[in-house]
Amino acid sequence: MRMRIASALLSLVSIIGLTTPAHADTIGDRIVRIARSQVGKPYVAGTQGPSAFDCSGFTQWVIKKATGKTYVHSSRAQFRSMLHIPASALRPGDLVFFFRNKAHHVGIYAGNGRIINAATPARGVVNDPLNAAWFRNHITGYARVLR
């Protein structure tokens, strides 16, 4: 029944000339969808998927799957090579960077104050609140994957 209703609505939309919003399936949406599909995978330093990831290997792999673009396997190099944006412009699919005492981290903003990231060997790929203490205290900036 739902399929018939959805089909009828799509037919009506095409008849009266309405279109779906341009943002209906953006690159950001694809990045988040692919990132979410990897939650639960293990963290292994120096890896870039698809069976295990470190933080920058995770973002590199997800971006490649979503866009076909290849970025380097280093959070610092990813930060340097992407378009920096202010926090107010953050949207799903953007990257969030953290630097502290030569340690570094990167994750994918999933919307609603959440970040998907290859966290630690004990936690693997997880969906965390961006307002968690460690993230809040070490955030460096935000960047947009060129779309």
Image (cartoon, grey):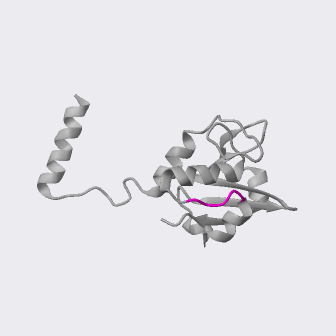
Q: Quarter of the image holding residue 86?
A: bottom right
75 w.r.t. 133: above or below: below
Of residues 147 and 28, the one nearer the viewer is: 147
Q: Main secondary structure of the magenta part?
A: loop
- Could you tell me which residue is drawn at 56 percent across and 63 percent down? 90
- Could you tell me which residue is drawn at 16 percent across and 53 percent down? 14
**Does the magenta-highlighted stretch encompass residue 71?**
yes
Total marks shown come to 0
Q: Position of residue 56 (x, y in %)?
A: 69, 53
Of residues 69 and 94, the one nearer the viewer is: 69
Q: Position of residue 115 (x, y in %)?
A: 63, 50
Placement of the N terminus among the 4 image quadrants: top left
Q: Position of residue 91 (x, y in %)?
A: 53, 60
Taking the image as shown, residue 85 lies to the left or right of residue 140, namely: left
Of residues 136 and 22, the one nearer the viewer is: 22
Q: Quarter of the image holding residue 72?
A: bottom right
Q: Examine the rendering and report whether any part of residue 130 can be seen.
A: no
102 w.r.t. 132: above or below: below
Q: Start and end of the magenta stretch?
A: 70-74
Q: Examine the rendering and report whether any part of residue 22 can be seen.
A: yes
**Does the magenta-highlighted stretch encompass residue 128?**
no
